[in-house]
Image (cartoon, rainbow, N blue to C red):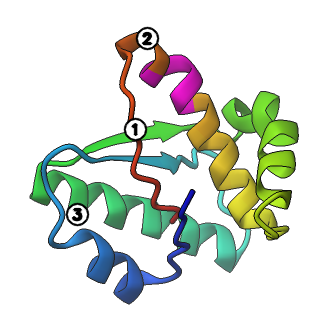
Amino acid sequence: MEYNTLDGYKEIHKELKDISGNYEIVCEDYRANIKTKDQAYAMKLVGYIEGLCITNGIKCTLQLPSQRKGYLKQSKETLRGYGCNVPHVIDSFAHVLRYIDKVVKKEETKWVQLIIC
């Protein structure tokens, strides 16, 4: 498994600006009251990612933070095997695991490109 974490507008733009075709971005959505600068920044990044996806014809699936909870243990265990213990990556991968469980398995898709934003 390969993964790449992206942080900030420039890194996200660089990674997503030229992709098209059989990609889908899974991104955590925020619908809570914004109380901190970090929360505001995260919400703006989600909107930016959505815009890049729309511009490039990439499907973007948004998940609420609560949707990852049933997959956190599996995410931690899987990533521990790759020497990764970064909380953001664990949370993001839990969203991907949920996506695979709820969408990919139903469509019998065999391959997933993982980009963690």
The reply to whether the magenta stretch includes residue 67 is no
Q: Are marks 2 and 1 in contact (CB under 8 Å)?
A: no
Residue 27 x %, y % = 49, 50
The magenta segment: 99-104
User: Which residue lies under the disc numbered 3?
Assistant: 52
Amino acid type indicated by mark 1: Thr
Q: Position of residue 35 (x, y in %)?
A: 73, 66
Which residue sits at x=87%, y=47%? 77
Task: Give me the C-alpha separation between circle 2 and circle 1.
Answer: 15 Å
Q: First in sequence: mark 3 or mark 1?
A: 3
Q: Nearer the viewer, residue 65 or 91?
A: 91
What percent of the width, then of the height, locates residue 58? 20, 48
Q: Is residue 31 above or below residue 85?
A: above
Q: Tell whether label 1 touches label 3 (CB within 8 Å).
A: no
Q: Which mark is residue 37?
A: none
Query: Which residue carries the number 2 mark?
Result: 106
Q: Relative to 77, is 45 on the left or the right?
A: left
2 vs 1, front mark: 2
Front one among 34 and 15:
15
Which of the 4 image quadrants contains residue 107? top left
The local secondary structure at tag 1 comes to strand
Based on the displayed image, in which of its 4 quarters is residue 98 positioned? Answer: top right
Q: Quadrant of the N terminus?
A: bottom right
Asked whether, in this view, residue 27 is left or right of residue 75, the answer is: left
Q: Is residue 37 left or right of residue 1?
A: right
Mark 1 Cα shell of 10 Å, populated few (<14), some (14-19), many (≥20): few
Report, in whole angstroms, how far the alpha carbon at label 3 lies from the one at label 2.
27 Å
Mark 2 or mark 1: name the one nearer the start of the chain: 1
**Secondary structure category for the residue under label 3:** helix
Other residues around mark 2 within 10 Å, as few (<14) / some (14–19) / many (≥20): few
Occupied quadrant, residue 71? top right
Total number of numbered discs in the rendering: 3
